Amino acid sequence: MYSELIAGTMRWGVWGANHSERKVQELIEVCLEEQITTFDHADIYGGHTTEELFGKAWKAMNIDREKIQLISKCGIVMNSDRKPSPLKYYHYDSSYIQNCVHESLAHLKTDYLDLLLLHRPSPLMNPEEIAKVFQILKSEGKVKEFGVSNFSNSQFELLNQDVPLVTNQVEISVNHLDSFFDGTLDQLMVKNLRPMAWSVMGNYFSEKTDQNIRITHILKELCQKYNADENQILLAFILKHPSRIIPVIGSSKIETIRQLKSSLLIDLEAIDWFRILEASRGIEVD
């Protein structure tokens, strides 16, 4: 249902490239050319402005709604010009979730979301209340499927017992390996559910750390071996995992989107995957 790569829109607006409506249309066009048909949003992106930017752009393109999939997230309350708040916190009351969905639908100019994610787990979330509002949204045709983001295994199970969840969108990169070892991916594999991954490049291109220096040393060899660039190898590292991770690529550049699509063709040998793992952790496997 969802494309093998997901276009993350967080940096398309004022939180990043600050693209014009026309530039967003160009990005959408390129994504569709590359069979990237799923677009990842959250109500808070761009201080509650990026969904609206995307909605205006795609609606003017006269794209058949059934040809794309729209994901959004809710649950984080944070201060912005659009929605002032004295404190950042999490909110999952039924009325709040419904209001968030209605606003996202209006901003995205669509009648339904393909997938709604709870953005962060809250100690105060009531699974029964959330399940009821999910059932209402589904029966009204406003949301097709539900999932979570950044949930632990126990938090996932707490909610999943009352409402079927289809994914957990978590941070996975060469710099952030927790999900490989804490049971998150194992849990989803047992349920035959595909995880989604955000921040898939980690801090590799933004920070010069000892970890990244070690990784660079390995990547130089692997780029030659696989005739690929560093970002393609980094994405191939994630794609190698048998849980069939769906990466959310957060690029706002056309050339990078095209480039990362080619990562799907790279099949790292096991020894090369473990060389990257070892470089990231700085130790041999046990």
Image (cartoon, grey):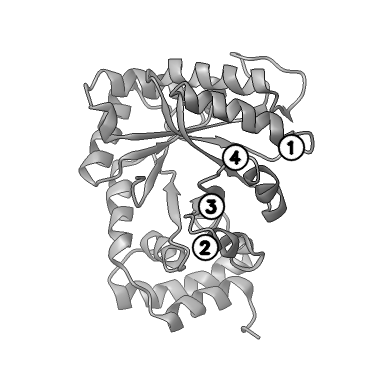
How many tags in the picture?
4
Indicate the amino acid at tag 1. Ser
What residue appears at the point 50 percent right and 52 percent down from the top-left corner?
197
Q: Nearer the viewer, mark 4 or mark 2?
A: 4
Q: Could you tell me residue 283's position as x and y percent? A: 64, 80
What residue appears at the point 47 percent right and 33 percent down from the top-left corner?
41
Cβ atoms at labels 2 and 3 below 8 Å apart: no
How far apart are labels 3 and 4 at the CA level?
A: 39 Å
Indicate the amino acid at tag 3. Ser
The residue at which mark 4 appears reads as 163
Cβ atoms at labels 3 and 4 below 8 Å apart: no
Categorize mark 2 by other alpha carbons within 10 Å: few (<14), some (14-19), many (20+).
some
Indicate the amino acid at tag 2. Met
The residue at which mark 1 appears reads as 122
Give the vertical position of 283 relative to 247 (above or below).
below
Label 2: state its secondary structure.
helix
The image's mark for residue 206 is: 3
Label 4: state its secondary structure.
loop
The residue at which mark 2 appears reads as 189
Give the vertical position of 134 relative to 267 (above or below).
above
In the foreground, 219 or 26: 26
Examine the image and state in which quarter residue 37 appears. top left
Q: Earlier in the sequence, mark 3 or mark 4?
A: 4
Q: Nearer the viewer, mark 3 or mark 4?
A: 4
Q: Can residue 14 be seen in the rendering of this structure?
A: no
